[in-house]
Image (cartoon, rainbow, N blue to C red):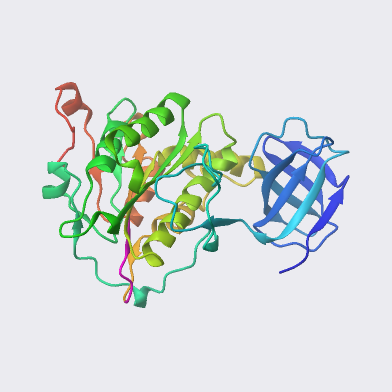
Amino acid sequence: MRADVSVTGMVNRIEGPLLFLRRTVNVGLNEAVQVEDDTGRGRLGRIAALDDEVITVEVLESTSGLSTVDTRIRFLGEPLHFDVGPDLPGRVFDGVGRVIDGGPVISAARHLRIEGMAINPAARSMPRDFIETGITTIDLMNSLVRGQKLPIFSGAGLPHDRLAIQIAQQARIHGAEAGEFAIVFAAIGVSFDVADRFRQAMEDGGALEHTVLFLNLASDSSTQRLLCPRYALTAAEYLAFVEGKHVLVIITDMTNYCEALREVSASHGEVPSRKGFPGYMYSDLATLHERAGSLRGSEGSLTQLPILTMPADDITHPVPDLTGYITEGQIVLDRDLDRADIYPPVKVLP
């Protein structure tokens, strides 16, 4: 690992969450940085783009108070990592893995890269057993099989948040001890009251003791929304493939993630594709969803249940369209069933 390097006065301009620096040091893509203002306050960031002359840094907090003159950039010499350990269940983190429940920091057993490691397809085992969610239309018609990824396609105003909480509280594995099952719940770009409702529901239902909760608020930087699912999946991979647990990852709302991806891509000046989303959105989503799986020789498994809202209930919109290509089937919530006061409003025969 390269030693830390610090530079001052190298910022050319600041645009939203991005800093554009003159390239005077040899650094790598996705390297973590510490951005300090003239008061010494530090902000975490990462290198998002490089060329021969410019380094583009994504700041994971507000860039308010930063100037092009006094800002000091410290290059940490390694990508973003997350400290994980066996005491993860029962804890609450923000979108970039910082403890926000008032408890002590995590006792780190591993220091893992948040991008994860590619799973060799030949090492995957065939998904066979299922996770019981307690939702009849899912368990009987669209079974959630361990090691797979099964998205829920919803719409604005439909009860997907209620459904996510209910699944997190009720999900279990037949014939397995409670300690063998864990949930990682990631809320991306939600309002404060929704985040508080998620947290309170987990505590009241007794699910928090085997749940790792990541809360990214709508008021947080858009760059944090791009990292929240990566921190959550890093925690899930540790629990599944190191601790040997069967882990269910619930992520809501992936549409907020994709909107943040479009916003940051536009800030980079990249050429947009369909509806302004970047052309690499498919491969970017695949780097998240393909982290699910069951491995030969591993006792644990990682199952994903991503939730996304379809803009204007359009299932051909780029976000649900590309997600459908990556995942195994989908659960679709229907507005007409919801208006008829049927819960859950799952369209079982689309």
Which residue is depicted at the point 28% across and 31% down? 162
Which residue is depicted at the point 28% across and 72% down? 125
Q: Nearer the viewer, residue 135 or 120?
A: 135
In the picture, residue 66 is in which quadrant? top right
Q: Is residue 201 visible?
A: yes
Quadrant in which the C terminus is drawn: top left
125 over 343 or under it: above or below: below
Which residue is depicted at the point 77% across and 30% down? 65
Residue 333 relative to residue 61: left or right: left
Residue 346 relative to residue 160: left or right: left
| Range of magenta residues | 297-303
Residue 166 falls within the magenta-colored stretch: no
Residue 154: % across, % down:
30, 35
Residue 302 falls within the magenta-colored stretch: yes
Q: Is residue 291 visible?
A: no
Quadrant in which the N terminus is drawn: bottom right
Residue 33: % across, % down:
71, 52
How many numbered marks have been drawn onto this rendered protein structure?
0
Residue 150: % across, % down:
28, 51
Q: Nearer the viewer, residue 70 or 243?
A: 243
Which residue is depicted at the point 48% across and 41% down? 257
100 over 175 or under it: above or below: above
Q: Outermost residue toward the front?
A: 104
In the picture, residue 195 is in which quadrant? top left
Residue 288: % across, % down:
44, 55
